[in-house]
Image: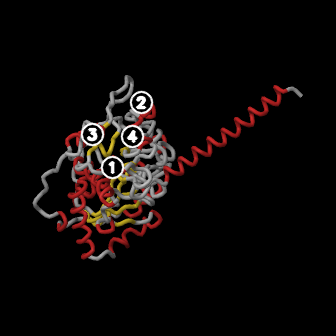
Amino acid sequence: MSHSWFFLVFLAVIDISLAADTGDIQENQEDFRNKCTMENCFDLSKCRGKEPRKVFIHPYTVDPGHPEPSPVWRQILQCIRESDFYTEDPSEACLFVLGIDTTDRDRRSANYVPDVDSYIANLPQELWNDGRNHIIFNFYHGTFPDYADHNLGFYTGQAIIARASPSFQSFRECFDISFPLFHENHPYELEEVEENDMASRNTSYLVSFKGKRYVYGIGSGTRNLVHHLHNGKSIIMVTTCKHNNDWQVYQDDRCQSDNEEYEKWDYDTLLKESTFCLVPRGRRLGSFRFLETLRAGCIPVVISDDWVLPYSEIIDWSEAALVVPERLALTLPEILMTTGRKKVDLLKQKTVLYYRTYLQSITTITRTAFEIIFRRLDSL
């Protein structure tokens, strides 16, 4: 048997061993990132002795053929740049933000930005530092059919993820931030509030919901059930199948009648005239409806198992919302009708308070995210 044969066998064994070691290392690194805390994945030395603490935004130039930053992302960056904690000098910074738009990571979306890994690879690596002290913002994770929330499609390292719709399985408590989902037309700055107290306003409906329903796929369960609760009087539950261009291909026997009933009701009026407003999960756990409900002074009834509610680190949502397990959706009328008047009044007061304090504008929302991190640092 030739020496060359032995040599080839030796190389093959080495390759297998190295591959196994590399796989173990990658698995160990991912396991470590999943257990990130402010103590082990954050460089506290960059923040000590720096008052006020500063935030630096990495430069970004849109590559040819790539989408422009979304309006929401542009507004978030504008909020940071207009804040008193913004700096153009990275040596002054305690926190760092990527300039590239990572808010939409659904590959089917027009706002999806590819090659985020290439952008990160071209950053000064002493600043990127495997993501330490970085906060990455994300609104939409995953894509059809499972919309998985554990992968943004690029390497996030040890960065803090400020994500809408996080699940308890993927959320790293006191490290990540459950970020609220809001439309681009959400007020940028504080808006004028009507003098009448929303918390004491009389309403016409016990509970309402007007929105899409999915005839197939993830998120379809609860929204396909709520029509059973609709009575057209105290409980308004109307849905439409009209979403996406191919909705008619998948329509069921109820779609036509549902669509007709849906058109009879005004969304904004329902929000303002309801004591409770249903916030069921969609394709993802979170919903624009949560903030829209709060803005209208309506008590959210969240039906979205496993959703970490926005800013729950500093907001006790049990004081301002009802969370109902998806399996109990059809018992909703009984739950709401047995909620006492005193509790309803307290819930409404907290609903208004939390919205005005933390969520009333894009500026407030953005600054609250950083204040949560600053508060953590003060406790270390």
Instruction: From the image, state whether disc 1 or disc 2 is nearer to you.
Output: 2
How far apart marks 3 and 4 lie (CA) works out to 15 Å
Residue type at mark 1 is Leu
Q: Which mark is residue 122?
A: 2
**N-term mark: 4 or 1:** 4
How far apart marks 4 and 1 lie (CA) works out to 12 Å
Q: Which residue is mark 3?
A: 77
Residue type at mark 4 is Asp
Q: Residues within 10 Å of mark 4 (few under 14, many from 20)?
A: many
Can residue 247 be seen here? no
How far apart marks 3 and 2 lie (CA) works out to 20 Å
State the SS at label 3.
helix
Q: Which mark is residue 85?
A: none
Up-down relation of residue 19 to residue 306 (above or below):
above
**N-term mark: 3 or 4:** 3
Q: Residues within 10 Å of mark 3 (few under 14, many from 20)?
A: some
Q: Quadrant of the image for the N terminus?
A: top right
How far apart marks 3 and 1 lie (CA) works out to 16 Å
In percent of width and height, residue 55 lies at: 28, 43
Q: Which residue is mark 4?
A: 104
Q: Which residue occupies the foreground of this view, 123 or 47? A: 47
How far apart marks 1 and 2 lie (CA) works out to 30 Å
Instruction: From the image, state whether disc 3 or disc 2 is nearer to you.
Output: 2
Instruction: From the image, state whether disc 4 or disc 2 is nearer to you.
Output: 2
Q: Which residue is mark 1?
A: 181
